[in-house]
Image: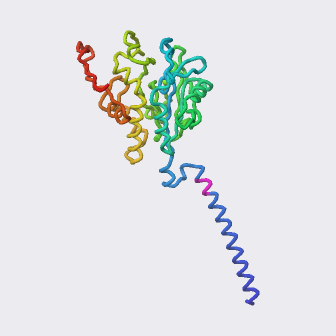
Amino acid sequence: MTKKDGLLNRWDSDKFGMKWSSVFTFIFCLFLLFSCAHEEFRSPAQESAKSRHVVFDIDWTIVTEVTRESAKIPKNKRIIEVQGKHYYINEGLEEFVNEILSHPEMKVSFYSGGKKARNEELLSKIKLKNGKSLKDIAYKILNNEDLIDVPGALPEWRFSEKHKKDLSKVSKDLSELIMFDDTAHFVFEGKELQSNHVFFIGTAFEYFDNFEEARNLSGDYIPKSYEEWLLNQKKLLILQGAFKEAYEEAVDGKMSFAEAMKQKEELLNLKDHYWNEHSRRYFKMMGGRAPVQIKLPSNDCLQGMRVIMGL
Ligand SMILES: [Mg+2]
């Protein structure tokens, strides 16, 4: 082989190497693009930063419609008007949302049986400390139009029996998703039981500025005692405390975020409308002072002996 042939071979070899190097670079770029687009191809480091979701129902969960004329009269800054109806922004909502959003991987969504226009107007009127509205910060807003119709439902069935919320519309991975709702069994039960991802916050009471307004009334949505009224009023603060604890447990890897929140649901037992050691603890964690309540027999004649301290 002459010196010229040797140089040509080397040049061919270099050319061949450059060609394959370009092919490898191209394949590597394709792999990166593919990995970013599909969660299932993410590395463990990327996986640890995957999104966690909190979904709020709207009516009776984050706001309470004010129906009694007398309740609208006081110039309460937390009462907003949307499409001719008045809504009280439940106490502690903005702080709770801020707490959730303080974690970069957390996303906040809203899912309501209300119409899109109403929901969006309502959420745009609730402002956080930074001036952004709940509509601005929402990951997703799902509405009446996003409910699933239950096949074979009869007209006399209740709304939440005829229509269901489908949480997979928020995220396909429900292990890191929890929804707060005042209506039990309002989610679609497919292959995966979506109710395992719903925190039932108990039936909400009507809005009363203070318990005195409700004292002489009766009904399913009227608090029977000051303690019941107070628990209803402070529910979001209690849930914020529960969220803080559950979040830490999920980050520590003890269990998924949804499992941790479901444990809190059981401990708090908000559906029974009375304070227990857990609701008192979470309320205290958020700076509140809860009443000490003695649980009495349901037919008690000792109502007058109820002990209230600290307020
Ligand atoms: Mg509701």
Q: What x and y, as percent, mark residue 104? A: 51, 45
Outermost residue on the front side: it is 75
* Residue 279 located left or right of residue 1: left
Relative to 155, residue 176 above or below: below
Residue 160 locus on image (x, y percent): 50, 22
Q: Quadrant of the C terminus?
A: top left
The colour scheme used to paint the residues is rainbow
- Looking at the picture, tell me which residue is in the foreground, 72 or 165: 72
| Residue 198 sits in quarter | top left
Q: What residue appears at the point 35 percent right and 36 percent down from the top-left corner?
A: 285
Closer to us: 151 or 197: 197
| Rendering coords of residue 215 (x, y %) | 37, 12
User: Foreground: 287 or 232?
Assistant: 287
Quarter of the view holding residue 18: bottom right
Above or below, comparing residue 181 to residue 225 in the picture: below
Rendering coords of residue 188 (x, y %): 50, 29
126 relative position to 272: left or right: right
**Quadrant placement of the N terminus:** bottom right
Please report the residue visible at 34 percent of the width from the left and 21 percent of the height from the top: 227
Above or below: residue 252 compared with residue 191: below
On screen, residue 299 versus residue 108, left or right, reads left
* Side (left or right) of 177 relative to 20: left
Please, which residue is most extreme toward the bottom here?
2
Depth check: 112 or 244 in front? 244
Most common SS among magenta residues:
helix
Q: Which residues are drawn in magenta? A: 31-35
- Residue at 29% from the left image edge and 27% from the top image edge: 310
* Figure disc tally: 0
Specify whether residue 33 is painted magenta. Answer: yes
Is residue 301 covered in magenta? no
